[in-house]
Amino acid sequence: MTFDVEQAKKWIMTFNDKIQENKEYLTELDQAIGDGDHGLNMARGFQETVKKITEGKYDDLGSLFKDVGMTLIAKVGGASGPLYGTAFMKASLALKGKKEVDIKALVEALAASLDGLKVRGKAQVGDKTMIDVWEPVIEYMKNRETIHSKELTDLSKEKMDGTKELEAKKGRAAYLGKRSIGHIDPGAASSYLLFASLAELFEEGEVAQ
């Protein structure tokens, strides 16, 4: 089995479900150290994204992820739209013309997403951003013959929780300096939900490992 358009759609739809369920939590996190709109922006943007990809017909993963990225850039306010949009646009380039891929190719596409995020956000591990989840998760996936859903979920959560101890170096939270310590980063929290959603596909055996 491989990762194909239907599995990609299911991943985005599962992520949207988790965002809708957790939008108030994400908003509370952002009210503490940011603009206070991360949950609402993500909920609105991914609802629009699901509508778009449900109505669309896709011959390859690249065109699907391109639509995801462009919709997020257009519909999600704040910093999260451009960042998540960039992530999916970079993945779309890596997956252009491919109807289905193995896990190695999927991870390579997500690594391209990570590179795009680091350039766009000018952030690195330790800055208290979504990169604190993305980079260790991608490293884990790159270095495993078999990706275990529980390990992927647990690692994502651990790295999200770890942002609580960090001082913010980027975004509005950086203005708080040391007062940002003690709060989980909202982008790290939504990134945890993204990878937890992907882990569910592995758990269900829907993706080749």
Image (tube, grey):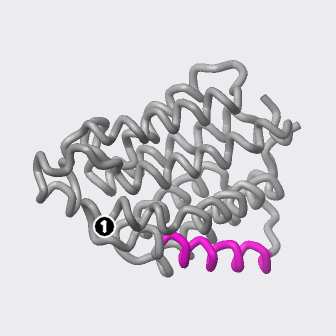
* Residue closest to the far right: 1
Residue 142, picture quadrant: top right
Q: Quadrant of the C terminus?
A: top right
Give the left or right position of residue 206, taking residue 51 as reference.
right
Q: Is residue 48 magenta?
A: yes
Q: Nearer the viewer, residue 202 or 70?
A: 202
Q: Quadrant of the N terminus?
A: top right
Give the left or right position of residue 165, taking residue 205 as reference.
left
Give the answer, above or below, for where 132 lies relative to 74: above
Residue 97, picture quadrant: bottom right
> Residue at coordinates 41% horizontally, 61% vertically from top-left?
83
The magenta stretch is 42-56
Determine if residue 150 is in view.
yes
Q: Nearer the viewer, residue 64 or 147?
A: 147
Q: Position of residue 192 (x, y in %)?
A: 52, 46
> Residue at coordinates 50% horizontally, 44% vertically from top-left?
112
Q: Nearer the viewer, residue 115 or 128?
A: 128
Q: Is residue 12 magenta?
A: no
Q: Position of residue 124 (x, y in %)?
A: 29, 40
Q: Position of residue 14 (x, y in %)?
A: 71, 58
Residue 201, picture quadrant: top right
Q: Position of residue 129 (x, y in %)?
A: 33, 48
Q: Which secondary structure is most common in the magenta stretch?
A: helix
**According to the image, label 1 marks what residue?**
31
The amino acid pointed to by label 1 is Gln
